[in-house]
Image (cartoon, coloured by chain):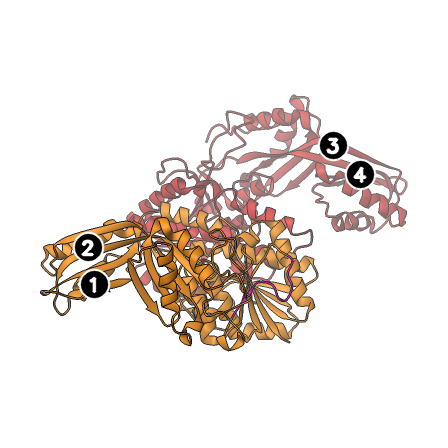
Chain colours: A red, B orange
Amino acid sequence: MPRLVMKFGGTSVANLDRIRRVAKRVGVEVAKGYEVIVVVSAMAGKTNELVGWVDQTGPFYDAREYDAVVSSGENVTAGLLALVLQENGIDARSWQGWQVPVRTSSAHSSARIEEIGTENFNARFAGGMQVAVVAGFQGISPEGRITTLGRGGSDTTAVAFAAAFAAERCDIYTDVDGVYTTDPRITSKARKLDRIAFEEMLELASLGAKVLQTRSVELAMRYKVKLRVLSSFEEQSDEAGTLVCDEEDIMESNVVAGVAFVRDEAKMTLVSVADRPGVSAAIFGPLAEAGVNVDMIVQNIAEDGRTDMTFSLPVDQIARAEKAVRQAMETGSIEFHDLIADKDVSKVSVVGIGMRSHAGVAARMFEALSAEGINIKVITTSEIKISVLIDRKYMELAVQALHDEFGLEKA
Amino acid sequence: MPRLVMKFGGTSVANLDRIRRVAKRVGVEVAKGYEVIVVVSAMAGKTNELVGWVDQTGPFYDAREYDAVVSSGENVTAGLLALVLQENGIDARSWQGWQVPVRTSSAHSSARIEEIGTENFNARFAGGMQVAVVAGFQGISPEGRITTLGRGGSDTTAVAFAAAFAAERCDIYTDVDGVYTTDPRITSKARKLDRIAFEEMLELASLGAKVLQTRSVELAMRYKVKLRVLSSFEEQSDEAGTLVCDEEDIMESNVVAGVAFVRDEAKMTLVSVADRPGVSAAIFGPLAEAGVNVDMIVQNIAEDGRTDMTFSLPVDQIARAEKAVRQAMETGSIEFHDLIADKDVSKVSVVGIGMRSHAGVAARMFEALSAEGINIKVITTSEIKISVLIDRKYMELAVQALHDEFGLEKA
């Protein structure tokens, strides 16, 4: 029998009424003849409650105990959904990570799935089980302790099960109805995409489109698991939502798939840095140690043995970054004349696998921004993405202009 | 190293502040040189919340899923207490039932502990673990499913660990400071007992003194585990609370240890039942099938082939009982002239192992009640207990009179 993985997030299982709706939706797929694996998150708010208690125990907690505590929310939802499915006449049972088993690394609170045991499920499916309800986000370490995969990890659980059981598809039910060309709150022209390539989704996910956990998309790409993102709050057809798939499965597509943005960025420039081999390491090493997430980096051409070094970072890490570079100067490992921080910038990116074969996308992007009088402060590019840093006040305008420029309102 | 089991109920771990108090109390025992096994319940109210959700899924739920859901509350407390103990510099870790493992029968929601694996704990204690925090109330079935032991089962978990690990004692921390000669709300002369025999505690527990789960006392008696009941809300000395122990460990004791009562009882009489061999089975079989908990039974001497059959039962089971006996009459399996129900009776009992060697306790009891003008409706006796059914309006008076008669205010 064909298999399907369905994943429901916290808002989709927030109370018994919603769990009943989920059960109905699962029933539809069972009726179609699928063996279904359902992956559930904790009821909305429950994980935060548990994390809050752990935080109250003290600042330096044992991640193994953290995992033992916070994983319990998913166990509750899995049991409740199995019960409701049974009420609907479906042969269902709940599975906790250690029961499957979902074997992970020992990196507590951010463990990686290493292997999913298939024997138990295959035996139970052969014995008539129609639905396996899996507590997401959790697994078991080689030491027999409970692990968790990090916040949002249930997406990764779902994709890993889809890969392990060769599921036809992995449907991620969430509170949005798919992946959009850009955030509909920025422009009403934003259009839901029917399909998007894994690579594009990865860039969008890492750019802050919070539809899917980045690691789940990486995993789906590696194992070619077809992912579908769709709303748990609407009646669904087979064509609903957005399919995240291999680029070979996308017939026609725009050169640019979407416009993404990160609103609260900052830019920091070290002015007139003494340029010598190893200076980059001397700057960015201490920043990394201080936990600063440096994103874009630009180095001016050196003149007279000195250069300007510019990088972007999240706004709330500025103080930490400044402290780190000043300490590096005091210890003599770097030397510069001035430090300028700009807290009012945003990052805007265009993403699309079509860029690989179409030249001139960058030029069109820069012209469109220029036509609106928007100054570009930093540029970075990858094979399928171009990002620019601009003044935050122009962010909405830039997104709208680029959405128009690349004709994203039309398929 | 000597070992100690400490058990804390839901009100003792109701929030982080109380969990910190529990950790402090555990620390005192660790400092004395004990290897400690702590058994915890769910935070007060949490199990009820979980049971409420399960109830919402429908009337005929799968007990296996019920167990998977409701057991999660204990896991949360165990992890949180381990974290707080670690903050206090104590080498502690949490253990869920399947990790120990606590092997139980497959009787979900009322499973019996069959074996506690000692290997993991012994290895960890040898490796420096000072405290094992165990999620109470739960275990694992031969099929690998999570089981629970029934409400209040954490007491049983604690006693089973004390037996398996040959603990010096099992301390049950609760919201009362020990076992009393009777309920202090009935008479201010009620006195906390320093020691009580297992057999006496069993009678008191089954009579509704809700200090300990009956099964935990049975288990303690079988394995001769010294149980101490004490308050988690008071500073403790080594002599605090009440020790439940073998009668050989009790030097001197009163003939009667305590006066117990069950307030809301009912009495039912089948008048002029056709008496023949098997009539008792014909009456009490259908009652048992209907889920009626018949307690005391009295049969009058038969005259002319007919007899009156009287029995006691909880007040809220009267309708069910009446339906069962009337149906039995309709099917012709029994025959009687009338059915009289008395909803206004209580049961009062005196309990004490001293009765085995002292005659005349029953006579003193009946005289004391008679002196107060209290009419006795039904009497039953066991080796260490005499119970009477009386009108409910005399219940407090009867308890006070018996407490005085047997001098229970004095040790």
Q: Amino acid at mark 3?
A: Lys
Q: Position of B410 compared to B336: left or right?
A: right
Report the chain holding disc 3.
A
Q: Label 1: which residue?
A: B285
Q: Are marks 4 and 3 on the same chain?
A: yes
Which secondary structure, mark 3?
strand
Magenta residues?
B235-244
Asked if disc 1 and disc 4 are in contact, CB closer than 8 Å, the reply is no
What percent of the width, then of the height, locates residue B291?
27, 57
| Dot placed on the residue nearer the N-terminal end, 2 or 1 | 1
Give me the disc on residue A343. 3
**The disc numbered 2 marks a residue on which chain?**
B
Q: Is residue B340 left or right of residue A23?
A: left
Residue at mark 1 to residue at mark 4: CA–CA distance: 94 Å
Q: Residues within 10 Å of mark 2 (few under 14, many from 20)?
A: many
Label 4: state its secondary structure: loop
- Residue type (three-letter) at the residue carrying disc 2: Ala
Residue A300 shows which numbered tag? 4
Give the Cα distance between marks 4 and 3.
21 Å
In the rendered structure, are the residues bearing label 2 and label 1 in contact, judged by CB atoms less than 8 Å apart? Answer: no
Q: Is residue B125 left or right of residue A344?
A: left
User: In this view of the protein, which residue sits in the foreground, A29 or B16?
Assistant: B16
**Would you say residue A244 sits in the magenta stretch?**
no
Q: Image point 50% across, 29% down: which residue? A: A190
Pick the quarter of the image with the N terminus of chain A.
Answer: bottom left
Task: Name the element at disc 2.
Answer: helix
Whole-angstrom CA distance, mark 2 to mark 4, is 94 Å
* Residue marked by disc 2: B324
